Each structure stands twice: as structure tokens, then as C-alpha cells.
Amino acid sequence: MSKKIIATASLAGCFGCHMSILDIDERILDLVELVEFNKSPVDDIKKFTKRVDVGIIEGGCCNSENVENLKYFRENCDVLISLGECAIMGGLPALRNGIPIKECLAEAYLDGPTVGLNTEKIIPNDPELPMILDKVYPCHEVVKIDYYLPGCPPRADLIWDALVALLTGSEMDLPYEVIKFD
Amino acid sequence: MKEKILEIISNYNKDKTRLMDILHDIQSIAGYVDAESIELLHKELGISASQVREVISFYHFYSSEPLGKVNIYLNDSVTAIMHGREAILETFEKECNVKEGSVSEDGQFGLFHTSCIGMNDQEPAAIINGKMFTRLTPYRVKEIVKDLKSGKDIKELIYEGDGGGRNALPGIHSMVCNNIRRRSALLTHDYTPFDVTKKVLANTSPEAIIDVVEASNIRGRGGAGFPTGMKWKFGRKAVGDHHVIICNADEGEPGTFKDRVILTEFPELVFEGMVIAGYAVGADIGLLYLRYEYKYLLNYLNGILADMRSKKLLGNGINKIEGFNFDIRIQLGAGAYICGEESALIESLEGKRGEPRDKPPFPVERGYLNYPTVVNNVETLALIPKIITKGSDWFLGLGNKASAGTKILSISGDCNYPGIYEVEWGTTIKDILDMSGSLDVQAIQVAGPSGALIGEKDFGRQISYTDLPTGGSMIVFGKERDILNDVVMNFLNFFIEESCGSCSTCRNMTSVLKERFTKILNGRGVKSDIDDLLNWSELLKVSRCGLGQTAANPITSSITNFRHLYENLIQKDVVFDTGFDLEESVKASCAAVGRQPILHNM
Ligand SMILES: Cc1cc2nc3c(=O)[nH]c(=O)nc-3n(C[C@H](O)[C@H](O)[C@H](O)COP(=O)(O)O)c2cc1C
Ligand code: SF4
């Protein structure tokens, strides 16, 4: 059986979900038998070099670069998974949703307690910088998402089970504890 | 001020169940309920400050922030918009120098929107400092504002004179018109007030009264259509220290205004209906819950009650019947559609947020202050004296088999003769459209936003509990109306605004549906969106009360009967689209930091 190709990305997330992927411990050796990684922080491949079977997304979209990246993944992956709370619902970054973006920027760069060094009171606006979105979007509000793996972060076992199920075409057990809210 | 507020609180014997009245009184002298008053209420009434705050924030017409000296509440029902609300709003905004939803800088004017105020037959309408102003035009708005600025009293501002009928009585003195255009069993003057109380009750047992009501087959006119005789029987059987009769005059379903007209022209019928209900059920407490929007009727109605008391038609030993003690108090609401739902209404009567209760127990078992309580609509109660006088066979002779008697319809929208029409159950939609002078009709909304939007193929159907049930609201839409943008969207906003927020389905799903619906309107819809809307609507049915259970009806019934409108809007060869719009979503931040959006390659 030819190896399945996997790609991963962290958008507006904290890399906690990626840490959880690594938390599958020595099973990572089994995983390497099953899959080949393409574009991913795990191997630092920046651009897709071939068609990917499964893309895994951590984090939602808070800026235009996240959007661009997410669309890039959608174009290149057959199956796309939202991994973790931020990808699925926006998570902590989405706490700013509901506060006008102007106020958020002012708090971050002009008025907040940690802006002492910004003596010129500049809000970064270089055209090279990604543009901030009006709110943080969960991934499925930007592109089509095929599967959702909940958790903050999702447990390593869940990720493992899901990948094995997806790659071997078997059914997956999703016990209540995994999908309950708190 | 502190003394005055303490005085108000002691006027109500520090009774926390009278919080609604106390808040009204405080607002009338202080303009709003400030932090100090809230503190006083907490100490004096023995409830927490947050309990006071949660009540203030629940009702549209209470405020814990300063309002204007003059406060204008402009109706935003669909009929108001059809009749030119936008121009009225613009004129108010310009003349008063204030944006909708705020108070002008000089503190002079507050301008707010409000859900249907029961004036659909004379829109656009607004409530200004508690007084009703109807059939507004930009010209009249300018005149009104000019007079208000010059310091004229609100009472002097009626340019058109009084509306017809009893609206001209000094106790009402309002420009509101009745617009009664068809009379039948209820709206005819073949009734001598209080004859039943004086001549029948003394020699008829409560059980016999209930038998007549039951035999007449009358069902509730408030919407749910529960058999009235059966409700009274349950109420009579239920055990409690007191029994309660409540008349539901909250009339909040957009498009209905018949209770307004009944209360104006036939209040004796309503009050006598309550007395008869009190006698039959064995009740001693009578309450009429009057929506705040109809406050202009309050003094007039209280005058009639005082008159009844002086004639021993209320109070202890009514008409010398031993042990028949029954009195009626009018409770003014404060702007919340959900308070029309009977258990929410009871919560509100107890001085709380109007959040519906879990059922069972039903109000007939445990209602107001946990006493057995019968809640009936204004129209239901007003029919009772006539049924007792003329007999159940007379009533059964009207209407059709499943639905006895008549129904008072409130017809508005694109018709030549908006107003009140009393028709027999079984009348077809076509006849209703013809009698109201509705030409070139595209659709009619039967029974308000929670009812059904139907088109031509259904105009042969009848109003009836078994075909098209209705509490009486009928809004007609002409051929040129944009059903989705103007009608369905207006109704969705109404439910979002009026949900009490207890159930997550009703609180969230309404907004989720609106989002998906908006996506279709924006041309980003795909076929699966229509299916999603229908499937997700099902979820709302698990909500606690009728509001949530019917909140998706504008969507489902417009998809069922006007599917082509949706299909015309969806993208033909795209199967999936999230509707995400990068350009739109970066606009605000780019403007805030002062840069041009770069959108290529995305
Ligand atoms: C959201 C909602 C709003 C309601 N509004 C009213 C109303 O304004 N007036 C009314 O009489 N009944 C209203 N009802 C129905 C009442 O709960 C109750 O069934 C009715 O007052 C009983 O009186 P009836 O049997 O005479 O119709 C409403 C119900 C719901 C769920
Ligand atoms: S259905 Fe809506 S209005 Fe009714 S109780 Fe639930 S949240 Fe409140």
C-alpha cells in the first residue's frame, strides 16, 4: 500500500494542537510507516510538492494570511480536518469578536499596559503585513471542512484514532467525553 | 429624590411582586432607574440588586441609563416600513439631531425602534412619551418636533383631532382610529352591559355557566385555541387558597390590533366576561395584563372598573351573591412580546422577567403566585356575556363545525381598507382579500410572523382551527413587494429581538438562520443552503415555548410557498460556498490603520 500524504498548518492557534500530535509518543514511528508528511511545520516544507490526502488545520482565521493559507490547503488536500477548538469555533482568539477592530487595535498598540515602547503611537500598517479580519473566523466559515476533531487541545489518542480510521477506512469511536463541552 | 422613591415603594407596601408598577412610577418621575434607586429597591424589597437589574434590562421601556426628555419609539413592523417608516425615521433623526437607538447630545430627544405597537392599520406610528401618534408623515413629524422644542405639552400635539368612537372620550383622547369595517356577533351593540351579572348569575350555578360555555364549543382566541369551557373546568377543579382570572391583553403578535379595538369600544364586555369567568371558576383575583403600548387606554379602563366597583359589580358580594368576591386590577406591561405567552405573562405579573415557565404544571394548576389561574384572551372573554345571553346554540350556528362563532381579524398591509373585520370561522382567504379591497396580491401572512405566509394557490383555504388557524393578524403583500428582503427578514429580526433568551435553540438558532438566509440574499447561496435552512428549522421545535417553536416559520413557510424566490437567488453552478468575503472582512481594520487592502491572489 502506498503511503498516504499528510499536511498540517497552524493558523490563529497556539501550536498546542500540534504538540498534541507529537504527544502520540512512540506511535509516531508507526505513523511514519503509514504516512508521509508534506507541507507542515513538522518537517518545515513550505509549499505543497504533491497532492495531499489529508490536511489538518489548527487555529481559525484572524488575518488575510490565515485565509490565504487555508484556501491553499483546501486546494491541495482531498480531505481537510479542523483540529481543536480554535479551528472549529475560533477559540480564545475569538474573544475579540464583538469588540470593534478599531478598539482592539487601540488597546493593543496605543492604550494597553504594555505599549510603553511604542512612543510614536504607531499602529503597524506596512503593506507587507497580513490584514486583520473584522473578527476571528472558524475554518468552516471560510472553506469547506470535511471533519472536526474537538478538544483544547484534542487528546493525542483522539488524533491517533482519527488518523488511523481515516487512513485505513475503518470506523472511529467518538465517546461522549470527547465531544462534551466542559 | 430618595424620599420620593421610598414613597413609591411604600405605596406598593414594599411588595416585590409589584416591581413592574414601581419601576414605571420611578421612571415617570426620574426618567430612568438609576443606580441609587436600584440600591433602594434591593434594600426595601428584599431582592438582590441584580434581580432588579435583570428586570429592567428585560423590558423594552425600562432603562437604567438616562433617556431623553422626550422619548420617541418608532414602530418597526413590516407594515410601518411598507408605509414609509424610513422617511419618518430620517425626519426624526434630522429634526431632533439624534441617531436611532440613542439620546441626543443635549439630552432632549431619545429615538428608539420598537416592535409592532398594534397600529398596523394606521402606520407609520410612534409612541412619544407614552402617547400614540399614528399616520405620521415627514411633514407632521416636523410640526411635532417643532412644537416639542417650543415646550408644548405632549397633550397639545394632536393635529388631527381624536380618532373616532370612544377614542374621543376625555379618558382616552387619542388620535387612534378604530377602523371597524365589519361587525358580527361580538362587535354589535345588542348588549346591555352587566345584564348577565345582574340577572343571570344569581340564579345560575357556576357549573351551569361552564356547561353553556363548554356547549358553545368556544375555543381560545389568543392563538392556541384551547377549549375555553374545558380550561374553566380544570381551573374550578384545581385546589388553591385563591383562584385567579387573567385577561391577556398583551396583543403583541405583529399585525394584530383587534384587542385594542375591543378594549376601546367594548371594555364592558371584557370585564363582564372576566366577572363571569370569576364566578364560574370560583376566583377572587382578576388581573388584566395590558401591554405598555396601550397605556393610553389605562385611565379610561380604570375608570370603568371604578364605576363597576361603585355599582357593586366588583368587590365583595357582587350583586349580593353571597361569597362571590372578585375584583380586577390592571397591570401595565413594559414592552416584551413574550409576555403574551401565558406563563411569561404570569412571571411578569409577579414582578419578574417575562420568561416562560416549564410546563407542566400549567397555569390552571399553578399560575399566578402558584394559585390556579385561568388565562384568556380579550376576545375570548368578550364573547362570554353574549354566549351566556344568547345561548350556546346561537354561537354554534355561527362559523363551521370545527370552529364555532366568529373571529375578529386585523387586516393591514397592501389593502385599500385596513382595519377590523369580524367574520365567521370558515371564511376563505379570497373573501377576506375581497372584503378588504386587496388587489394584485402576491402573498398574505396569516396569524402574524409565527403563522403562515401563503400565496395564490392557497387563497381558497379557510380560516379555521383545522385549516388555517389564526389569532387574527392578516398582513397583505402586493405584487411589487420583495417578500424575502422586506417581509421574511423583518420577521426574523422580530424573533431575534423578542426571544427571552432562555433556550439556546431560540437564542442562537434564530441568528444562525438569519445568517444563512442573508447569505442567500447576498447572492452567495447554494442549493444546500435551502435544505440547511429547512433542516435547522426543525431544531427550534425543541424550544420551551411557542415563540421559539414558531420562530422559523417565516423561513419554512416562505420556502414552502415561495421556493422560486430562493431558487432565483442561489448560484447555479456552484455546489459549495461559505459566503466568506475577504474584501468585506478586512475593510474595517484597513480603515483603522490607514492602509489600502491588497486583495490580489486571494
Ligand atoms: C410567544 C407567544 C405570544 C403570545 N401572545 C399572546 C397575546 O398577545 N395575547 C393572547 O391572548 N395570547 C397570546 N399567546 C397565547 C397565550 O399563551 C394563551 O394561550 C392565551 O392567552 C390563552 O387565552 P385563550 O385560550 O383565550 O386564547 C401567546 C403565546 C405565545 C407562545
Ligand atoms: S422558546 Fe425562546 S422565548 Fe420561549 S422560553 Fe425559549 S428562549 Fe424564551
Image (tube, helix red, strand yellow):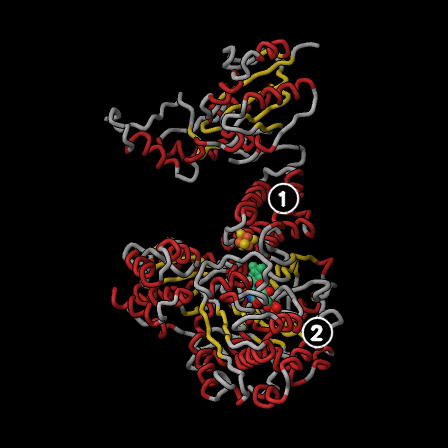
Query: In the image, which is nearer the foreground, mark 2 or mark 1?
Result: 2
Residue in front for this viewpoint, B111 or B597: B111
Q: Chain of mark 2?
A: B
Q: Residue at x 29, y 54 (%)?
A: B105
Is residue B31 positioned above or below B381 on the image? Answer: above
Q: Position of residue B416 (x, y in %)?
A: 60, 68
Q: Is residue B291 visible?
A: yes
Quarter location, residue B427: bottom right
Is residue B303 positioned above or below A12 on the image? Answer: below
Q: Is residue B455 left or right of residue A135?
A: right
Q: Is residue B305 left or right of residue B392?
A: left
* Mark 2 burial class by Cα count in 10 Å: few <14, some 14-19, many 20+: many
Q: Chain of mark 1?
A: B
Q: Position of residue B584 (x, y in %)?
A: 47, 35
Check disc 1 and report the residue beneath it: B536
Q: Amino acid at mark 2?
A: Asn
Residue in front for this viewpoint, B504 or B176: B504
Q: Which numbered tag is attached to residue B217? A: 2
Q: Residue at x 60, y 79 (%)?
A: B280
Q: Which numbered tag is attached to residue A144? A: none
Q: Quadrant of the N terminus of chain B?
A: bottom left
